[in-house]
Image (spheres, rainbow, N blue to C red):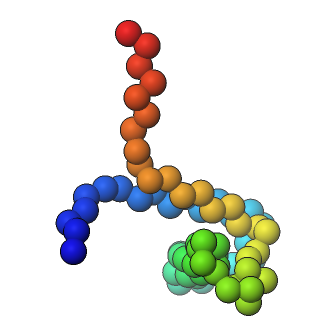
Amino acid sequence: MALLKGKLILEIEYEDLPVPLLGYTRAIIYRACAEQAYYRRPWASEEDIQKQDPKFRVRLDWGEKNNDSTE
């Protein structure tokens, strides 16, 4: 077993998402974003790939720092 430390940044953008204006609007958005991130996992099945909605853009960043210093 390994003990790891790190950071994973998941950025999800959505456009023209139809959501009713109710008290649980934020929960609907959270769920839709989480589902789209799940459908885009590297080992996704064909069924999950078909569920990917083009209204969403998902970006994954491992939080690694670039050593591009020009000293």
Residue 8 relative to residue 30: left or right: left
Q: Which residue lies furthest to the bottom in this view?
A: 47
Q: Position of residue 13 (x, y in %)?
A: 64, 60
Q: Which residue lies furthest to the front in this view?
A: 1
Q: Position of residue 40 (x, y in %)?
A: 64, 73
Q: Residue at x 64, y 81 (%)?
A: 44
| Residue 51 visible in the snapshot | no
Location of the N terminus (image quadrant): bottom left
For residue 32, what is the image quadrant?
Answer: bottom right
Q: Position of residue 21 (x, y in %)?
A: 65, 79
Observer-nearest residue: 66 or 55?
66
Above or below, 13 relative to 70: below
Residue 62 relative to residue 18: left or right: left
Observer-nearest residue: 22 or 32?
32
Q: Position of residue 49 (x, y in %)?
A: 73, 80
Observer-nearest residue: 64 or 35?
64
Q: Which residue is drawn at 59% across and 74% down?
A: 41
Observer-nearest residue: 41 or 12?
41
Q: Which residue is drawn at 38% across and 9% down?
A: 71
Above or below, 56 relative to 6: below
| Residue 2 visible in the snapshot | yes
